[in-house]
Amino acid sequence: MTDTPPTRSSAQRKALDAADEVVLEYVAFRGFNEVFRALNAARADDATRRGAYDATFATDALLKPIQTLDHAALLDAWDFLSSRFFRRLDAEMTAHAQALERGVYRAYCVAAVKRGERQKATQLLTELARRDAADASKKPPSAPKQDAEVAWALYDDDDRPIKPPPVDARNGARWREWFAMPHVPRPDRDPLFAPYFKREWHDALVLSLRNFLATVFASAPPPKLLLLQTWHSSQAQQKLREELQSARSEREALEEDLVRTRATRDRLASTLRDLLVAHHHGHRASPAKPRGGLFDDEPSDADDARKA
């Protein structure tokens, strides 16, 4: 009976589990105990076994800071999405992302005013103005699309709030106008802000945000860590590892052969030295041999010569 090849879902699940283990190992190495426990708990409760970017999950991650009036968490969530997914969008999709970003921040300000915590809206707007001012210092500011003084004409001189610092035209003059919103007694009746207090606008924002994120996530590559795990378990990498192991075995065999060759060479050299030493000592100890070479005179000839 042949084994059934693993399905795509099981292979993906295996890759996800391997990536989770790498993350757990890293957070344990860094000593992030709370993160370690939270991740383990999240894995245990992962009934859906999510293995793809979820637009609904990402939308909820943006809406929760609006509900809790945590402007820092809202900015962090959007900055992550912007740096990870929105940076490589085309011009049209980038314009959609910027419009939704403004909508999300406006929804936060509206929620803060509705709950009577207008200072929360001012904190977010101050941070946005600070960011825009930092951007303005890096590039020449463009002219605002609208007259920013319109909003300030809504107040008498005594009630008019302090103007925010100049902002870059990345968001136009809208944030200057919205700086006035926390100070308007009934912004839900103001012609400029009233549309954003309607339920229809909020529902349309949430729907547009979810659809936009679903479109972006559909073409987004998987996380780099998951790609690393997939790459590590790919057939090409398995083949490379097999070739590497074969090369290591061949190298070890060559090293062993080299050791044996050197040992044989050393034995031959030692034997040759012994033979040379023995030959040298034998040559010095042997008696002189009588002459009788090819060019030596015969003994009788030598005797006759002496007699003559």
Image (cartoon, rainbow, N blue to C red):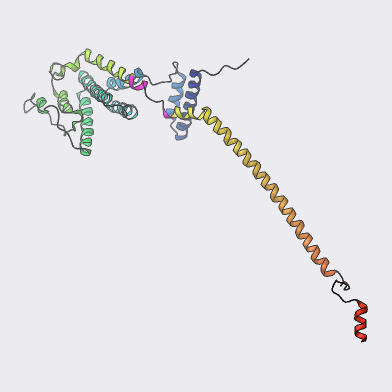
In terms of depth relative to the viewer, which is nearer, 287 or 28? Answer: 287
How far across and down, in percent of the image, does residue 158 sit? 7, 28
How far across and down, in percent of the image, does residue 250 sit? 63, 39
Task: Name the outermost residue toward the top.
Answer: 200
In terms of depth relative to the viewer, which is nearer, 183 or 285? Answer: 285
Segment colored magenta: 215-224
Residue 170 appears left or right of 48: left
Task: Name the outermost residue toward the bottom.
Answer: 308
Residue 75 appears left or right of 181: right
Q: Is residue 74 visible?
A: yes
In terms of depth relative to the viewer, which is nearer, 299 or 196? Answer: 299
In terms of depth relative to the viewer, which is nearer, 301 or 215? Answer: 301
For residue 77, which quarter of the picture?
top left
How far across and down, in percent of the image, does residue 15 sit? 49, 24
Q: Is residue 60 visible?
A: no
Task: Name the outermost residue toward the left.
Answer: 157
User: Tag count in the figure?
Assistant: 0
Magenta-colored stretch includes residue 221: yes
How far across and down, in percent of the image, does residue 192 sit? 14, 20
The quarter of the rendered structure image containing the C terminus is bottom right
The quarter of the rendered structure image containing the N terminus is top right
* Vertical order, 291 against 15 (above or below): below
Which residue is pictured at 22% across the width and 30% down the height? 128
Residue 37 appears left or right of 192: right
Magenta-colored stretch includes residue 301: no
